[in-house]
Image (cartoon, rainbow, N blue to C red):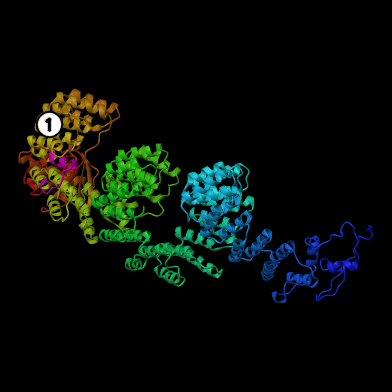
Amino acid sequence: MITHQSMIPSPLYLRRFFFLYPKFYPFSSNFKNPIHLKPISYNHKLFSWKLSFAAFSNTAVSYAYDELPERKSEQEGGKVIDFLHVMEQRGVCANSETYLWLLEGCINSGSFSDGWKIHGKILKMGFYSEVLLCERVMDLYIAFGDLDCAVKVFDDMQIRPLSCWNKIIHRFVAKKMADRVFGLFRQMIKERVKPDEKSFAGVLRACGGNVVPLHYVEQIHAVTITHGLETSPLICNPLIDFYFKNGSVGSAKKVFGNLRNRDTVSWLAMISGLSQNGYEEESILLFCQMHTSKILPTPYIFSSVLSSCTKVEFFELGEQLHSLILKQGFSSETHVCNALVLLYSRSGNMKFAEHIFNAMLQRDGVSYNSLISGLAQQGYGDKALELFKKMNSDCLKPDYITVASLLSACASVGSLLKGKQLHSYAIKSGMSSDLILEGSLLDLYVKCSDIETAHDFFLTTETENVVLWNVMLVAYGLLDNLNESFEIFKQMQIEGVVPNEFTYPSILRTCTSLGALFLGEQIHTLVLKSGFQFNVYVSSVLIDMYAKLGKLDTALNILRRVKDNDVVSWTAMIAGYAQHDMFAEALNLFEEMQDEGIQSDNIGFASAISACAGIQVLDQGRQIHAQSCVSGYSDDLSVGNSLVSLYARCGKVREAYFAFNKILAKDNRSWNSLISGFAQSGHYDEALHLFAEMNKAGIEINSFTFGPAVSAAANVANVKLGMQIHAMIKKTGYDLETEVSNVLITLYAKCGLLDDAERQFFEMNDKNEVSWNAMITGYSQHGRGFEALKLFEDMKQLGLLPNHVTFVGVLTACSHVGLVDEGISYFNSMREVHSLVPKPEHYACIVDLLGRSGLLSRARRFIEEMPIQPDAMIWRTLLSACIVRKNIDIGEFAASHLLKLEPKDSATYVLLSNMYAVTGKWGCRDRTRQMMKDRGVKKVPGRSWTVVNNEVHAFFAGDQNHPSADMIYEYLSDLNERATELGYVPQCNILLNDAERGQKNPTQIIHSEKLAIAFGLLNSSSSTPIHVFKNLRVCGDCHNWIKCVSKISDQVIIVRDAYRFHHFEGGVCSCKDYW
């Protein structure tokens, strides 16, 4: 009988197992370090007669293994092998569990050589069919990076559990071996191994490299749904990532919407995906949703949402996120700091960007790239180049993004030499073939105007890069070289390079700048064929081209087809209207744009303000001015220049100067706006003074400066100053500019030098419609109607189309020479032949034509039958004719309409009063004057000017204030006596009754033109014509007097009144007493 005591093995018996638990027994071995014993307590529960090796395989073996001494090197052998040797010496055979534990030890200790030997032992012992053991061997090779051996172990396994498949799949994913992932997955399906969420997750992550078609992933997605895994974050997260990378935003949103347990990876995939696919605002809103849901964002989520803020320029929100980042403690995270540097750089706050950069604990290449690119884009090219030196001192190697940013910096500061040095660096570093870098290099040479080098470099690049072709198109566009641009474009098609959305705009802009509408329309046809007509950028450039080149209807049709509310497209259309003087249309479209909720940019505000200036709607212009300030454009140069033009054109001198002085960086357009505005609003002296100041300041004067300056000189009849400006025009080469020559024609015509105007006109090489209109109008104003009509016929024979201005000159010419039938015929031809709708000024010309010919009843009937409402100018013309013909009935009829239209205009009361005076209706005259007084209307005094010794002298009626007044009146008395001898009968008091004639001082009724002529005769030689300009119509008395004086003095006297020129010579006037 075996007793309980006999069942306890003796120490001698257990000695054969003590190597498993060496602390039980002190035995000698070849171990270098002594083994310290612990007392053993016999426990019958621990040992039994059925004691075996397996009983110690996990607990005892582990304890024994830990007590083995550490080896100093692989050469000395590992503990695992030593342990196996001891086992063999003791005659104990290790089983699979022992090997499992030993493999674990190799993995944990990093002893690959021991593990490799253990694998050999396993194969030798025949344990290769053990599934768990083979899986651990596979883990060993995976842990030490020997994927090929791991795969071989996997392939040799007779039974492969799902965990092994997943491990190999995920290692392939980690190694970016997508093809092998897909191959293994296919094999898995073929062997009917059912994938779990880890399997699908691995395959989907392999798809994230964008190497598989979308439909393949959609099929996998469908399979996961059939397996009930559609809500698994492991599967949904890579799905979201893949769909975003392939532009399938809707699918990504759907997956995210079905995901119930969203982790931070899910939110990150969604926020970053939206940001990268152009849905920045949605990504920001999603972040806000995440934040309100009390989900703590990770640094990577902050980085993504900051990137979104930067892209859509939500800089204030980005600053708020910066505060949240500080609160969350992520301000030291490198990638968060990089995003902040980029945010502040793009917002122009380089001080903050540099502060964050300098405070970073650890900077990488992205950190430097963010700040360098920001400095380059903000125009701090020198600082960007300095930062590049610091990057080198930090031992960070620049990548192609760094070099591209530096090249941009060189281009911005025009540093061609440094750019070439960077080019050399790129070649040495093997980066010169990078597509982005090639584009930056080409851009450098183009912006530094080294087109020859740019072209040579272009020839050395890969022809498939469409960006480079686009840059070359821009390069030749900058040179206005349309031929080379088209050659590049044709060669691009020959090479088979497919144009993108930037190709067509590049060449369209060249067509726009050169006015090549026909070629632009051909490019538009190619745009339609290639399907880019719905691209917002392409559409905006097409709108700009058609708007600038006068095809406004076509431009508007394109705008109406643009689906996105693109502010650039709208402002291009508004600017086109403003440039073609369609100011009302520009303002209507500006209001429509605001109603659509589109926030205007600086171009939109500048164009709208220019439109207000064009039609002088000051109140609306002030409102838009206020809007531009609220929108942050108060310091914008284009807006500032438009404001100067607005206030100057509206005659607001003080406000115009205020707007002008507020512009910090004035350009010649700023000066031109002020000069042109004053010239157009009648402040001619201010305009000429500014022209002199601009010239003195050394500001570049161009054709837009000379035009208004010459116009101002013409309007003050300062022909000598006009000639001086003409000399400057010749010196600077602007005399070849058609627009400048046109203004010079007007100058000489308005100053009475019609011969000089003719010379200027006939010497022009390139005449346009304005040139012909200026000469026709000049002939008309000087009463040379037949020459004007002949020139009009010549114009038509040359194929030039007359416009509304042309017909004003033609009809005025007919009026001044009494060609009634011809004038009516020309008027009718406007609509019937030339498809021009007559404007009020054309109707006024016909009324003047009929009135001068005494056909007042016909003129009244013509007005009553007009298809448009008669304006004040038409009624005033009829009233003036009634004074000459002394027709009270029609005159009162015209006056009644005038008083309704312009009750505050003094001219109506003066004309009506004069009509009553010449017909002897003194009571009616007095009542008219009293009505004028009661209504607070003041008469505009008659005034005349003449230029003597380059100085303008102005006179009023009965003027006693001139320094030479006594001499003038003495000489005037002598002229009157001599004129009387020639038959002159004074009629200067025709507007006074008998009582008034006796009360008036004789000098008070001497009109201003007589004083100006007398002064001119006193201070000029007999060979010099006398030029006098009057703001009102010359009366009959003065007209007769001047005829006599021209004969007495034997001098030519040229008088320009409010209606026309009168050339007096030898007692005869050019108007032949018909004016």
Q: Is residue 932 left or right of residue 81?
A: left
Please indicate, yes or no, whether residue 277 appears anywhere in the rendered image: no
The answer to if 543 sits in the magenta stretch is no
Residue 526: x percent and y percent?
Answer: 29, 51
Task: Point out the image quarter for the N terminus.
Answer: bottom right
**Residue 741, can we see it?**
yes
Q: Nearer the viewer, residue 131 or 905?
A: 131
On the image, the x and y values in percent for residue 290 come to 59, 44
Q: Which residues are magenta?
A: 796-811
Above or below residue 390? Residue 600 is above
Label count reads: 1
Disc 1 secondary structure class = helix
- Frontmost residue, 410 versus 717: 410
Q: Is residue 805 magenta?
A: yes
Q: Position of residue 424 (x, y in %)?
A: 43, 72
On the image, numbered disc 1 is attached to which residue?
884
Residue shown at the point (59%, 57%) measured from the top left: 170
Q: Which residue is nearer to you in this view: 940 or 698?
A: 698
Please identify the quadrant where the C terminus is shown. Answer: top left
Label 1 environment density (alpha carbons within 10 Å; few <14, some 14–19, many ≥20): some
In the image: residue 485, left or right of residue 860: right
Q: Magenta residues: mostly which secondary structure?
A: helix
Q: Up-down: is 893 above or below 236?
A: above
